[in-house]
Image (cartoon, coloured by chain):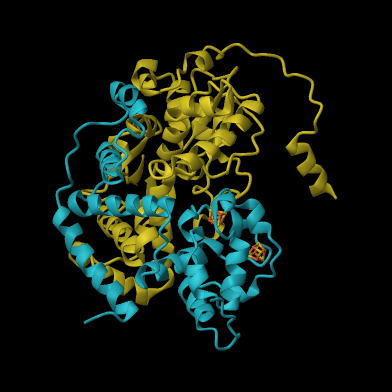
Chain colours: A cyan, B yellow
Amino acid sequence: MITLGIQGKNTFLSDVNKRSGANVLECYQCGKCVGTCPVSGYMDFPPREIMQMVKLGLKNETMMANSTWFCLTCSACSGRCPREIEIPSVMEAIRHMAIEENYINGSTKVKEIRKFHEIFLDMIKRYGRNYELRMMAEFNIRTRNLFKDMHLAPKALLKGKIPLGVKPMKSAKAIQRMYKLAEKLEKKHTGKEA
Amino acid sequence: MKKLTYFPGCSAHGTSEEFDKTVKMVMTSLDVQMEEIPDWNCCGATSAHTMSESLAYALPLRNLVLAEKLDNSTMAIPCASCYQRLKVTKVHMDDNPELCKEINSTVVEDGIYQGKVDVKSMLQYCFEDVGLDAIKAKVTKSLAGMKLACYYGCLLTRPKAITNFDSPEYPMSMDKIVEALGAKATEFDYKTECCGASFSISNTEVVINLTGQILEMAKESGADAIVVACPLCQSNLDMRQPDIEKHLGKKIDLPIFYFTQLMALAFGMPEKDLMFSKHIVPVEGALANIGKIVPEPEKVKKTRKAVEAESEAE
Ligand code: SF4
Ligand code: SF4
């Protein structure tokens, strides 16, 4: 159900503003961001609509949209926004809130994007650095798409473009400790701390 | 002799070995001594800031803390994505001591952040700290005859409040560097369009689309090669070019050089050391233009510079 928020009682708007450091109310719906955004065509709602939805307090619709997952943080939009709104920070704030509050967009594309980021972060946790070949292979295995990009592999490997083995950093332990502490911090912020 | 702290980033030991190697060659020749941050870690790239605010700051912060142990005032980073993560972290930590203290607690065993080291991209360092005159002075083999589209991507100059470098819409620093080497920089309107790098593996369709447009526009600008300052841009434009040609149904055939490879070439360093063999799109055609200066075709359209000059005069 779509429920219109009332300004003043719109806690979604104030949460997004607080978290992003932007003021979404400043948006006057000119649409310049949409014309600038290289991926607005892939989004359920382009950036201008996301702004309006936040203003209206449409929390569920905004948090479930694929838009924040498609945002590349390229800052093309914010550079041209006449109201100087940090649009990518707004996108990021909404995405972080959606992750924390378990709003899950179930489309294949969003699932794949999310999986990629999870594998990437997992790899850094283990080794402290990212190994591109392993990254590609793991992504393909975990999305059950074993042969994706395989046609690129022979040439890339032959040319030494993608190295086979790499050695992890020395203090990978420091990274594991950092992950644990960072997770605690996050829980503290979302009030989920035990 | 200048001293500089160096953060190579993960791809330096992988897909962008040739960038790492030529950066080192060029810096030695320009009398800059580089010191690598000991036991640096991955900056977290897009993934950390997509998924977690704390990790997005903590991973770069550890590198900033380690960099302060090296006693140089500046650090330079070849990868645009690493550069952005470290610079965003630096700016936010400097502006917000409370947040800084909190994030620092996750890496406190490595040290306490003091904000002593300036963070620059390698392109910015070459342009601002080394300077065009010093670069020009090293050129022994002019690249005259080459026509190059300089591609900056989205992260090297944006957002302006963070990078504080060049123009977010139409930067010229790399253009000026390649012109100092004797080449001609073409007027290339897609120089700051995003290539979709962070989707390279997870959302290839978007990348093919975005990168396809960039390659087409570079071709239209009359360039015979593209120059980049980021490993992610390079691998997207180079490695995926055959797929993109299939998608567009036409030949693009534009080799993708790192600006430091061209600097090294113009400085007279042996071609065999510049690792051109790692490129997927062959470079020979573009390199063969060196020395062949073609007369400029009559311009019908007014050049951007002329339009800018006019509007400034108004
Ligand atoms: S460009 Fe700025 S003001 Fe215009 S619609 Fe987008 S966010 Fe709103
Ligand atoms: S930052 Fe995100 S919303 Fe803005 S133009 Fe880039 S991809 Fe689109």
Task: Check the image and report above or below for B303 versus B55.
Answer: above
B10 relative to B274, above or below: below
The answer to whether residue A183 of the structure is visible from this angle is yes
Compared with residue A23, is residue A149 higher up or lower down, i.e. above or below? above
Tell me which residue sits at (80%, 31%) in the image: B301
Q: Position of residue A160 (x, y in %)?
A: 29, 25
Front residue of this view, candidates B8 and A23: A23
Going 36% across and 19% down the picture, which residue do you hit? B277
Quadrant position of ligand 2: bottom right
**Camera sees residue A23:** no
Residue that extends furthest to the right in the rendered view of this protein:
B314
Q: Residue at x 62, y 71 (%)?
A: A52
**Could you tell me residue B228's position as x and y percent?**
49, 35
Q: Is residue A10 above or below residue A50?
A: below
Q: Nearer the viewer, residue B287 or B118?
A: B287
Left or right: B14 as drawn, with respect to A10: left
Quarter of the picture holding the N terminus of chain B: top left
- Count of numbered tags: 0
Residue B303 horizontal/vertical position (percent): 76, 34
Left or right: B212, with B270 as reference point: right
Q: Quadrant of residue B59?
A: bottom left
- Farthest front residue in view: A1
Percent position of residue A100, x then y:
35, 71
Q: Is residue B155 left or right of residue B292?
A: left
Q: Nearer the viewer, residue B249 or B252?
A: B249
